[in-house]
């Protein structure tokens, strides 16, 4: 999990950024600050992995000044500038910032910034969380790159997500919303949302059995655990496979 400090003198902007970051399931916002002095104290105190900061706060270029001070205190901290002004891009990157996000931003743009932070810490992750048929998952305190082909299915169990993977004694467990995980699997043809609580890998499915009035049980090759698929989704898959 990336530990981040948010620095912006606009409370609404901090709230929006916090919400967007936390929805990705990859970032823990450890604290916020609205000025340079407070931010520096919190950098020393918390030692964050990354600082998301506005370039202009109470003074012009105050964010750039803060970035310089932060890097002198903690050279490994990743800096992401957040601003409404394009003109500061060149100056921002002179301080070796990881990324530069223009307001207004969206979740996709924020996710790109997060993945650049992760790439700098874990080079094997590249620039996306699903590079070359893999997805980056936060398991406990570690990050693992898991190949799509090795996933049987993903299920939501209470507040947790369980990822059933080949050659593992038990599923990987993580705390992430299934909807967010589904977004991160966008454009992956083999892993599909089959049910409100399940994502299945069609490449490992060997059959379906009736299960109540609204669902079917999904059977997997060389795996004794099962998933569920809604009857509506099952009809979609039948059409897809027939085509």
Image: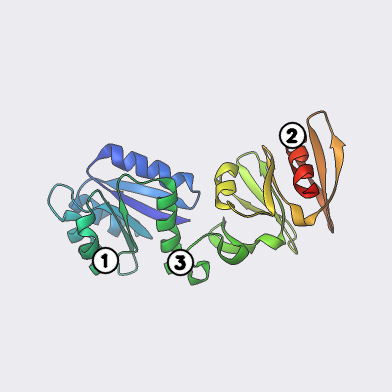
First along the sequence among labels 2 and 3? 3
N-term mark: 2 or 1: 1
Question: What numbered label is drawn on residue 93?
Answer: 1
Q: Is residue 232 above or below residue 128?
A: above
Q: Circle 3: is it few (<14), some (14-19), or many (20+) Cα within 10 Å?
A: some
Residue 169 picture location, percent across and down: 75, 60
Give how far apart the Cα atoms at labels 2 and 3 are.
Answer: 39 Å
197 lies above or below 116 = above
Can you give x and y, in whole percent of width and height, for residue 32 in the image?
30, 46
The image quarter in which residue 118 lies: bottom left
Q: Position of residue 132 (x, y in %)?
A: 59, 66
Q: Nearer the viewer, mark 2 or mark 1?
A: 2
Q: Residue furthest left?
A: 59
Q: Are marks 2 and 3 in contact (CB under 8 Å)?
A: no
Q: Around disc 2, counting alpha carbons within 10 Å, would you say few (fewer than 14), some (14 to 19), or many (20 or more)?
A: few
Q: CA distance from mark 2 to mark 1?
A: 50 Å
Residue 133 lies left or right of residue 28; in this view the side is right
Quick one: SS at disc 3? helix
**Circle 3 residue:** 119
* Image position of 131 (left or right of 169): left
Residue 172 visible to the viewer:
yes
N-term mark: 3 or 1: 1
Tell which residue pokes out farthest to the front in this image.
243
Rate crowding at label 1 as few (under 14), some (14 to 19) or many (20 or more) other CA atoms within 10 Å: some
Give the residue displayed 22% in from the left and 50% down from the top: 38
Mark 1 secondary-structure assignment? helix
- Residue designated by label 2: 232
């Amino acid at each position: 999990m990336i530990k981040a400090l948010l620095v912006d003198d606009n409370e609404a902007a901090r709230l929006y950024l916090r919400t967007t970051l936390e929805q990705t399931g990859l970032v823990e916002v450890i604290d916020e600050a609205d000025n340079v002095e407070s931010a520096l104290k919190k950098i020393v105190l918390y030692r964050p992995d990354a600082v998301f900061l506005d370039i202009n706060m109470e003074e012009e270029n105050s964010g750039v000044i803060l970035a310089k001070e932060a890097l002198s205190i903690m050279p490994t901290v990743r800096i992401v500038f957040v601003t409404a002004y394009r003109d500061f891009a060149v100056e921002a990157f002179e301080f070796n910032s990881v990324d530069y996000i223009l307001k207004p931003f969206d979740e996709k743009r924020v996710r790109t910034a997060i993945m650049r932070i992760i790439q700098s810490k874990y080079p094997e992750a590249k620039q996306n969380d699903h590079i070359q048929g893999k997805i980056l998952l936060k398991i406990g305190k570690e990050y693992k790159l898991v190949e799509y082909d090795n996933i049987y299915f993903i299920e939501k169990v209470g507040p947790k997500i369980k990822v059933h993977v080949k050659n593992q004694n038990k599923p990987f467990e993580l705390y992430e919303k299934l909807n967010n995980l589904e977004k991160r699997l966008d454009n992956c043809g083999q892993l599909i949302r089959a049910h409100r609580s399940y994502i299945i890998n069609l490449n490992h499915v060997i059959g379906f059995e009736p299960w109540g009035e609204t669902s079917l049980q999904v059977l997997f090759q060389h795996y004794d655990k099962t998933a569920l698929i809604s009857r509506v989704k099952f009809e979609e898959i039948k059409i897809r496979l027939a085509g």
